[in-house]
């Protein structure tokens, strides 16, 4: 833990942003056919030609976040206005109250990232109030907080403020334990330190899964599937690394792949050096964006 804290200290400047400048980020595309909306059972993840059906019910979480103003619906729709707007599936996730299992595809992964980001930011949780992110001065200066510009009011007005679900002590302990073992290739901090949008979104996903009784094993499996949509080229490179050793990615424990050695920024750089060069997708950056092309910018980690 002491070594991890030292590593976080050294990476902190890269994770803090200038609050008035947010790097261009999340790309949104048109979505495929909708899932059946009236599912009442939690289903295991299913691979389909159009993406992955996750083992969580979305229900009315979009409605709750709009009602709580952690999402300003007008700003959210304006975000995608220049990309043909939100389709019916996306609007149902934002305004519907009978959504079934959440589905993530290559086309909607940016929007799912934004929805889960808002959820992780707004949901009341001890990780946000007393975890590592709360121990570094102004919490509002991280990419995951200052970068959330589509709430009503300031993002910190909603930070860990809303009871979107109530976790039992056992469920909270599960979220805390799992979050410490899940990294993302854009940063060197775990989900337990959600200083960028991907980390905050993953925290939201873990909270939903815990609240709906998903097992620890299934949480890691689902987290890897979702991370693979947010960082497709990075995980393709990791798969090639294992293939070079005669192993398939599916045969490796998801918890191991999500750990520091493979999924952190520093861990992935070591893996990438051992496989043919790939263009890093970076999960579309660490800011809210409509997906419009922008001029190239120098970026380090998840901040300016």
Image: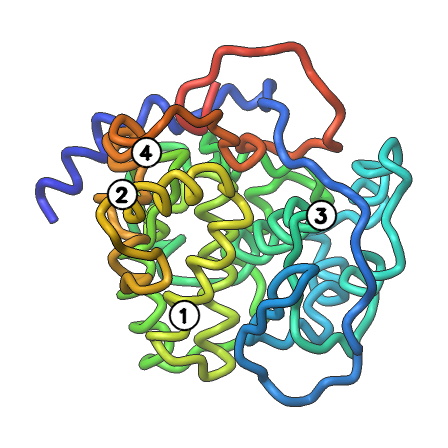
Which mark is first along the chain, 4 or 3? 3
Q: Position of residue 24 (x, y in %)?
A: 63, 24
Q: Position of residue 134 (x, y in %)?
A: 34, 45
Q: Secondary structure at mark 4?
A: helix
Quarter of the rendering containing residue 20: top right
Which mark is first along the chain, 2 or 1? 1
**Mark in the foreground, 2 or 4:** 2
Considering depth in this image, is 74 or 110 the residue closer to the camera?
Answer: 110
**Mark in the foreground, 3 or 4:** 3
**What residue did someone put label 1 on?**
219
Q: Secondary structure at mark 3?
A: loop
Spatial CA distance of label 1 from label 3 is 23 Å
1 and 3 marks in contact (CB < 8 Å): no
Residue at 90%, 39% (x, y): give it.
84
**What residue did someone put label 2 on?**
244
**What residue did someone put label 3 on?**
107
Quarter of the rendering containing residue 105: bottom right
């Amino acid at each position: 833990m002491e070594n991890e804290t030292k590593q976080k200290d050294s990476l902190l400047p890269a994770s803090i942003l200038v609050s008035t400048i947010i790097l261009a980020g999340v790309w949104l595309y048109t979505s495929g056919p909708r899932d059946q909306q009236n599912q009442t059972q939690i289903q295991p993840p299913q691979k389909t030609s159009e993406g992955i059906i996750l083992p969580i019910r979305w229900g009315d979480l979009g409605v709750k976040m709009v009602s709580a103003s952690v999402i300003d619906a007008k700003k959210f729709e304006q975000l995608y206005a220049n990309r043909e707007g939100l389709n019916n599936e996306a609007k149902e996730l934002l305004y519907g109250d009978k959504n079934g299992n959440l589905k993530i595809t290559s086309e909607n992964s940016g929007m799912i990232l934004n929805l889960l980001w808002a959820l992780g930011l707004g949901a009341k949780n001890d990780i946000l109030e007393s975890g590592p992110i709360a121990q570094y001065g102004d919490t509002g200066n991280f990419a995951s907080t200052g970068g959330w510009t589509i709430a009503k009011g300031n993002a910190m007005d909603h930070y860990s403020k809303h009871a979107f679900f109530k976790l039992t002590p056992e469920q909270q302990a599960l979220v805390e334990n799992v979050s410490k073992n899940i990294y993302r290739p854009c940063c060197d901090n775990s989900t337990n330190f959600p200083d960028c949008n991907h980390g905050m979104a993953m925290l939201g996903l873990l909270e939903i899964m815990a609240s709906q009784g998903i097992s620890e094993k299934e949480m890691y499996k689902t987290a890897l599937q979702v991370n693979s949509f947010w960082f497709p080229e990075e995980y393709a490179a990791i798969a090639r690394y294992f293939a070079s050793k005669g192993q398939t990615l599916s045969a490796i424990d998801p918890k191991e792949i999500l750990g520091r050695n493979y999924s952190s920024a520093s861990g992935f750089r070591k893996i990438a050096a051992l496989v043919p060069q790939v263009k890093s997708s970076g999960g579309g950056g660490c800011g809210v964006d409509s997906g419009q092309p922008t001029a190239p910018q120098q970026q380090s980690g998840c901040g300016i």
